[in-house]
Image: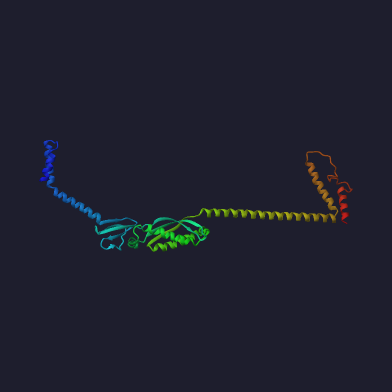
Amino acid sequence: SFLAQGISGLLGRTKLDSVGMQRLQELVGKLAATGTPLVAGGAVLVGGYYAVNNTIYTVDAGHMAIKYHRLSGISATTYREGVHFRLPWLERPIVFDVKARPHTMTSLTGSKDLQMVNISLRTLCKPDAAKLPEIYRTLGPDYDEKVLPSIVNEVLKSVVAQYNASQLILQRELVSGMIRQRLTQRAADFNILLDDVAITHLNFSPEYEKAVEQKQVAQQQAERARFTVLKALEEKKRTIINAEGESQSAQMIGAAMTSNPGFIELRRIQAAKDIATLLSKSANRLVLSTDSLLLNLMSGGPTQLDAEYASTATKKK
């Protein structure tokens, strides 16, 4: 053929020996003779690969698919994981991730007592598998990015405004439950399901935190002052009790001395005993008057103290 002759002519221009040139011309002649079946086979293979690649599609685990038809639009049927068929060119699969995905959003809002609160909320959301065609038709595949930021800010502002700053800390579980309830209701309007809603961070303005710290310091100082007052009162009571005890003791001693003159002699004996005990333990040796040390117990006459006591009793009479 003409193709064989042209290739043979090109090969004939190369620097080959006569035997090699003859073999190449024979090979080219055979390929030119069978060229049409090879082209047809290649076309069949390419066409089969294109048909298989555009007719079969796979849905992975945790995903679901819907079909878009060029003539009828979005199909109402959903397809779970596995291998599915479609019409080439006419149908196009749209795959959704139906696993729960985390989203963390932060909102700056005001409390009931007009304190600014910076609150972070973490949600686990997924689309309603039965409403995938409607979600794609109204929101598109990035439904969560379009819906969640707006409804989360709305719910956080409405719930936080019902509580004081202190209640947000003390009643955190109650606040989280109310946020979850309202956010679930709002997300259901857009065919979005929420598996979990939790408050991750709750921060107040630096001014409020400083005021809380000052309040705590003031309370501690007040407690310390109250303790000081109570301690002073107890000291006062103890002083009064001691004074009353000493007064009663003096009255009792005076009554005993008045009614029984021997009481003085008994006290002299006890004082002399104590003084003698102290002197016996002393390393110094001193010579002192027994009258001044109340040690003259054997003398029958009255001592100077007896004379003073007798003169005092006379004056009272």
The residue sitting at 26% across, 56% down in the picture is 56
Q: Nearer the viewer, residue 264 or 229?
A: 229
User: At which x and y percent is residue 124?
Assistant: 41, 57
Looking at the image, residue 250 sits to the left or right of residue 183; the answer is right
- Position in image of residue 213 (x %, y %): 56, 53
Q: Residue furthest left?
A: 1
Residue at image position (21%, 54%) is: 48
Picture coordinates of residue 177, whole percent (x, y):
46, 61
Quadrant of residue 90 within the rendered picture: bottom left
Q: Residue at x 75, y 54 (%)?
A: 243
Whether 94 is drawn above or below 5: the answer is: below
222 on left or right of 58? right
Q: How is the image coloured?
A: rainbow
Residue 264 lies left or right of residue 72; in this view the side is right
The quadrant in which the C terminus is found is bottom right
The spot of residue 263 in percent (x, y) is 83, 53
Q: In the rendered view, would you say 29 is above or below 93?
A: above
Label count reads 0
12 left or right, relative to 98: left
Q: Quadrant of residue 223?
A: bottom right
